[in-house]
């Protein structure tokens, strides 16, 4: 499904949160007090979120990538190309041409619609048709 068919909630623009606006000065003081208490609680228990993330990232084992072929698919540089006897590039295919006698020509009927014409009566009928 392409993005233009999705509802607005799936938009990729405008995802940044704006400045926090408090209902009153009292609500702001209360939010700041709760934030301070939360940081103090984290310090008391020895939990620092950023340091913990950094330590976990540094202690994890490094990723290793192996670029080896699966079994049975070794290096095949020793296999030569097949010699088909052609000395140069192949010429392009010839464009087919109608060599029969049934079709007189091709007419345009409606909105550049190509129509085969089999008789003189059909040619007159197509030429007198209105849009």
Image (tube, rainbow, N blue to C red):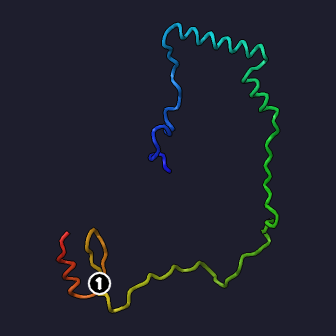
Q: In the picture shown, does residue 71 fall above or below 33?
A: below
Q: Label 1 crowding class (10 Å Cα cut-off): few <14, some 14-19, many 20+?
A: few
- Answer above or below: position of 69 versus 54: below
Placement of the C terminus among the 4 image quadrants: bottom left
Locate residue 64 relative to residue 106 in the image: left or right.
right
Q: Secondary structure at mark 1?
A: strand
Give the quadrant of residue 104. bottom left
The residue nearer to you, when weighing 76 against 41, is 41
Depth check: give the residue in front, 62 or 79: 62
**According to the image, label 1 marks what residue?**
105
- Above or below, 52 against 97 in this view is above
The part of the image, by quadrant, that contains residue 7 is top left
Residue at 25% of width from left, 74% of height from top?
A: 109
Q: What's the residue at 54%, 11% (across, down)?
A: 28
Across and down, in percent, residue 6 comes to 47, 44
Residue 121 spot, x, y in % from top left: 20, 86
Residue at the image point whose x is 79% and y is 43% from the top: 63
> Residue 84: image x %, image y %?
67, 83
Asked whether, in this view, residue 33 is left or right of residue 16, the answer is: right
């Amino acid at each position: 499904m392409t993005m233009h068919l999705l509802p607005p909630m799936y938009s990729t623009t405008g995802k940044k949160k704006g400045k926090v606006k408090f209902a009153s000065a009292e609500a702001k003081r209360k939010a700041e007090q709760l934030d301070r208490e939360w940081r103090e609680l984290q310090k008391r228990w020895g939990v620092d979120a950023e340091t913990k993330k950094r330590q976990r990232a540094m202690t994890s084992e490094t990723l290793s990538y192996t670029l080896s072929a699966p079994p049975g698919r070794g290096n095949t540089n020793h296999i030569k190309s097949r010699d088909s006897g052609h000395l140069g590039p192949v010429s392009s295919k010839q464009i087919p041409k109608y060599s029969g006698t049934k079709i007189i020509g091709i007419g345009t009927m409606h909105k550049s619609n190509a129509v085969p014409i089999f008789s003189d009566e059909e040619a007159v009928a197509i030429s007198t048709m209105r849009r």
